[in-house]
């Protein structure tokens, strides 16, 4: 976790900057609340997802993926609550310590991605998962609300483990019943 510096150190750093770049409306709003005098220095940037890494969405596995390095206690609790409730034809895989291409490869195999985004600006993994045909269930980290309104996303309020599990099991049930197919690129 990043160290939060003192207000004076932060004000000094931002004040000396020629430009301040924010990667989401949420981030820019937060900077404007703290340092309204900097509004003229702030510009919006957008992340770019490398389309060259895309593959056609073929047959997906009954696989749920997540990244445990963010909010590890939350993901551990979701796994604990899921316990033995998943059908035996489904599995869960942690994505950790792999290259960006390996992340894409895993997303192209999985059907569901559990998002444990925290306050981090606009997080790429939920968008990458959705663009790889996954149902994305989880936290927005606030900034990801910019795209969580799309049909392939289901927001869970941060810390609501029971709702996280409920929505995950409901998605699994829809996939198994043929009522939800692997999602197309957004």
Image (cartoon, rainbow, N blue to C red):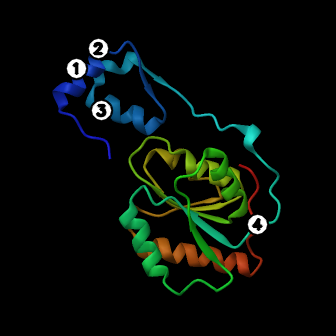
Reading the chain from its start, which is encountered first: label 4 or label 2?
2
Q: Residues within 10 Å of mark 3 (few under 14, many from 20)?
A: few
> Which mark is on residue 56?
none
Task: List x then y, in percent, for residue 173.
Answer: 66, 80
Task: List x then y, in percent, for residue 157.
Answer: 42, 62
Q: Nearer the viewer, mark 1 or mark 3?
A: 1
Question: What is the CA distance from the residue labelled 1 to the residue labelled 3?
Answer: 16 Å
Q: Name the element at disc 2.
A: helix
Tell me the residue that label 1 is attached to: 12
Residue at position x 49%, y 33% from top? 23
Is 171 located above or below residue 22 in the figure? below
Reading the chain from its start, which is encountered first: label 4 or label 3?
3
Asked which quadrant contains residue 74, the reply is bottom left
Residue at position x 46%, y 60% from top? 68
Number of numbered discs: 4
Question: What is the CA distance from the residue labelled 2 to the residue labelled 3?
Answer: 18 Å
Tell me the residue that label 3 is attached to: 33
Dots 1, 3 in contact, CB < 8 A: no
Question: What is the CA distance from the residue labelled 4 to the residue labelled 2?
Answer: 50 Å
Tell me the residue that label 4 is attached to: 60
Dots 2, 1 in contact, CB < 8 A: yes
């Amino acid at each position: 976790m990043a160290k939060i510096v003192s207000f004076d150190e932060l004000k000094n750093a931002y004040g000396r900057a020629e430009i301040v770049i924010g990667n989401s409306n949420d981030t820019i709003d937060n900077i404007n609340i703290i340092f309204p005098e900097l509004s003229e220095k702030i510009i919006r940037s957008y992340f770019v997802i490398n389309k060259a890494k895309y593959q056609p969405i073929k047959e997906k596995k009954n696989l749920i993926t997540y990244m445990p390095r963010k909010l590890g206690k939350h993901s551990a609790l979701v796994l604990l609550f899921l316990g033995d409730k998943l059908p035996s034809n489904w599995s869960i895989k942690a994505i950790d310590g792999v290259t960006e291409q390996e992340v894409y490869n895993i997303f192209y195999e999985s059907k569901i991605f559990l998002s444990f985004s925290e306050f981090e600006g606009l997080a790429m993994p939920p968008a990458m998962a959705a663009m790889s045909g996954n149902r994305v269930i989880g936290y927005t980290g606030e900034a990801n609300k910019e795209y969580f309104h799309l049909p392939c996303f289901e927001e869970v309020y941060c810390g609501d483990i029971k709702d996280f599990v409920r929505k995950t099991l409901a998605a699994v049930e829809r996939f198994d019943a043929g009522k939800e197919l692997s999602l197309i690129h957004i």
